[in-house]
Amino acid sequence: MDKPAMSTEGPTRPYFLERSQVACSRCALGSLCLPRKLDPESTRQFENIVNKSRPIQPGEHIYRAGDKFQSIAAVRAGCFKSYVINKSGEEQVLGFYLPGEIIGFDAIHEKVHKANVVALDTSSICGLHFDSVAEMSRQLPRLQDELFRIMSSQISELEANAADLSAEERIARLLCSLAARFASRGYSSSEFNLSMSRRDIASHLRLATETISRVLARFQGAGIIKVNRKKVNILNVDKLKELARRDTY
């Protein structure tokens, strides 16, 4: 059985506060991250508020539920999951974050993080104090537009996951989503590794762990995918999209 990620007690470390700045203009994720539509001069301004973290090990948290909201984080490398603890004391996974994606928007309204965010493999982030981002977005309309786009995208994904779908549809949608996200990062859309465990996937999709394994085996038997531990090969894209009821990949 997959074990839950390790955790540590006490408040999380401000991983990026004392770290060096990064050059967004030279980052491989420049076409995905917040400053992607900024002109060169605006990008240089944005770089002044970005700080790179040290390596974050699997099981280390960057946010915990109840932490005071000060920053958002752009994933620079690795993979993170966000989760809450439900009334039964069980972990409920809310989402997964890949390089170029932004974490921490859940805390803007009440100024407190509602979810825990933990690294699933060796990772790093770019930290941004939100007050600085908000002030700069008022000066740079393109940055403000990108903030709204990212927040809207995250809300749309949450609404899609809340739809009344079968187990097959939920798993197919997740695979299609991951394929598209990997493709946008320059990786293969048909062959990738899953950093998240079957248990995490089951929690995120509101399914039993056994159901995840059973449906993946069914997809493999039908020649739609091939699974070898954490490695997934998508063999029949059209069939997977049909099962996911998605128009795009």
Image: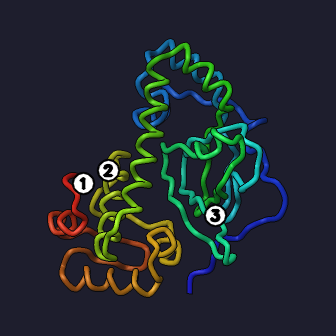
Q: Residue 249 carries which label?
A: 1
Q: How crowded is mark 2: few (under 14 residues within 10 Å), some or many (20 or more)?
A: some
- Which one is in front, 69 or 19? 69
Q: Looking at the figure, which quarter contains the C terminus? A: bottom left
Look at label 2 and name its amino acid.
Ala
Query: Measured along the vertical axis of the image, is residue 3 above or below residue 165?
Result: below
Which residue position is annotated with label 3? Answer: 84
- Which one is in front, 145 or 190? 145
Label 2, secondary structure: give it: helix
Which residue position is annotated with label 2? Answer: 183
Label 3 or label 1, whichever comes before in sequence order = 3
Q: Which residue is drawn at 49% across and 47% down?
A: 99
Label 1, secondary structure: give it: loop
Q: Position of residue 91 (x, y in %)?
A: 62, 72
Spatial separation of the CA atoms under disc 2 and disc 3: 29 Å
Spatial separation of the CA atoms under disc 3 and disc 1: 29 Å
Query: Measured along the vertical axis of the image, is residue 48 above or below residue 189?
Result: above
Look at label 3 and name its amino acid.
Val
Label 2 or label 1, whichever comes before in sequence order = 2
Q: Position of residue 79 (x, y in %)?
A: 53, 57
Tell me whether circle 2 and circle 1 mark residues in contact (CB < 8 Å): yes
Query: Measured along the vertical axis of the image, is residue 227 above or below residue 49?
Result: below
Q: Residues within 10 Å of mark 3 (few under 14, many from 20)?
A: some
Label 3, secondary structure: give it: strand
Look at label 1 and name its amino acid.
Tyr
- Which one is in front, 225 or 167? 167
Q: How crowded is mark 1: few (under 14 residues within 10 Å), some or many (20 or more)?
A: some
Q: Residue at x 71, y 56 (%)?
A: 65
The nearer-to-camera label among 3 and 1 is 3
